[in-house]
Image (tube, grey):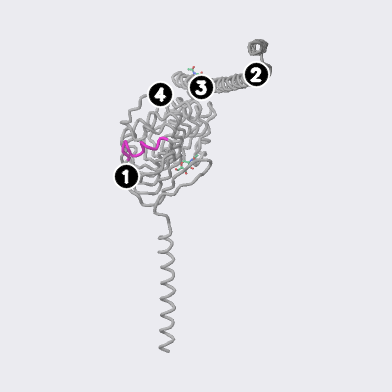
Amino acid sequence: MNRIQLCIVVVCSYAVCAKQMTDIEALASAPTRCTYEYAFDMYGAHCAGLRLNKIPSLRGGIEILDFSDNKLQEIHDDTLSSYSSIKFLYLSENQIYSIEENAFFYLSNLQTLDLSKNVILALPESIFHLSSLRKLYLNGNPLLHLHFSNLKLSRPIQAPIELLDISECKIKVLPEWGILPQLILYNISNNPLTSIDALHFSSMCKLSKVDLTKSIDNLKLCDMRMTITWFQEKKVYFQLEDYSKLNSREFESCRKEEIPANLNATYHECRSLYRQEQSIRTSRRTWLTIGGGLAGFLVGFVLLLYVMHRHNVTQTKRAEKETKKIPPDGDRQASAVLLNNVA
Ligand SMILES: *[C@@H]1O[C@H](CO)[C@@H](O)[C@H](O)[C@H]1NC(C)=O
Ligand SMILES: *[C@@H]1O[C@H](CO)[C@@H](O)[C@H](O)[C@H]1NC(C)=O
C-alpha cells in the first residue's frame, strides 16, 4: 500500500512539475528583445509586451514600431528623434503620463499614432502639426479631461487627421479642435458629456460617422435637437446605443429651429479649407508628374546625344582607317622624288 501511495505521489508531483516547467519554458522562450520583420512591404520593429520601461536603441529605417503593452512612462524630445522614418507608431497600454512638447516633432512620416490606454494628462501641440498624421487614437486616457480646457492649439490644425478617437476619456465638454477639414470618423463614445453643440461638428465638413454611444444619455432631449438636425442635414451617421428616444413624442415636440448662420459659415470655411488642401495636393502631384516627365525626357535626350556621339566617333575612326589605307598622292610624289634623287 505504502509503495503504491508513494508511487502516486511521485507521479502526481512529476505531473505538477511538468506543467510548471512548460509554463516556465513558455516564458523563457518568449522574446525578450524587439524583433524585426517585413509586414505590408514595410520594415517593422515589434517590442510589444516585453515589460520595457524605455524604448531600446533600434535599427534605423523602421517604418512600424509596435511598443504597446510595455511600461513606458515618459516620452522625451529625444526618445523618438532618430526614427523619423516611422509611419505607424503603437504606444497603447503603457503608463505614459508625460509627453514633452517636441516628442513627435521629427516624425514627419507618421500616419498612425496610437496612444490609447495610457494616463496622459496633457497633449503636446506638435501632434496636431504632424504633416502626415491621419489616425490619432487617444481613447482610454482617463485623465485627459483635466487639461483639455488648457489645450492651446494654433488653428487650423495642420495634421490631415481622418480618424480621431477620444472614447472613454471621461470628457465632459468636448475640446475645441477648430477646423478639422479631413476628419471622417470621430469616436466620442463612452464619455460623460454634459453638453453637445452643433457648432462643434460644423467645423468637420467631411465627417461621415460619429460614435456617440453612451455619451449623451444624460443630456436633455431638446438640447440635442440642433445637433441631430445638423447630422441629418449633412448626412452624418451618428451611432447611439438606443435611438428610441429620438422617435419619442418628447423629442418631436422640441422647438424646431432653423440652422443658424454661424453653423453654415463655419461649415463653408471648412469646405474651402478642404478644397485648398486638395488643390495643393493635386498641384503637388501634377508638379511631381511634370517633374518626373521632364526628368525622363532629359535622360532620354542625354542618351540620344550619347548614342549620336558614339555613332560619330565610330564613323570618324572608320574614315581615319580608310584614309590610312590609301596614302595621299603627295606622299607618292615625294617617294618618287626620293627615288629620282637616289637614281
Ligand atoms: C469607438 O470606441 C469604442 C471604445 O473605445 C469602440 O468599442 C467602438 O468600436 C469605436 N467605434 C467605432 C465606430 O470605431
Ligand atoms: C444654412 O443652410 C441650410 C441648408 O444647408 C439652410 O436651410 C439654412 O437656411 C441656412 N441658414 C442660414 C441662416 O442661412
Q: Is mark 4 within 8 Å of ligand 2?
A: no
Find disc 2 in the rendering and name its residue: 324
Compare residues 199 and 28 and report the one nearer the observer.
28
Closer to the camera in the image, 174 or 246: 174
Residue at image mark 3: 284
Say the numbered circle drawn on residue 73. Answer: 1
Q: CA distance from mark 1 to mark 3?
A: 39 Å
What is the spatial separation of the Cα atoms under label 3 and label 4, in whole angstroms?
Answer: 21 Å
- Secondary structure beneath label 3: helix
Question: Which is more toward the observer, 198 or 298?
Answer: 298
Give the mark, 4 or 2, whose residue is nearer the N terminus.
4
For mark 4, what is the residue?
156
Kind of residue indicated by mark 3 = Arg
Instruction: Point out residue 43 in the picture as x, y percentages from the top left corner.
Output: 48, 42
Secondary structure under tag 2 reads helix
Q: Is residue 79 magenta?
A: yes
Task: Work out which quarter of the rendered image holds the N terminus and state it.
Answer: bottom left
Which residue corresponds to the image point at 49% horizontal and 20% vertical from the top-left?
A: 280
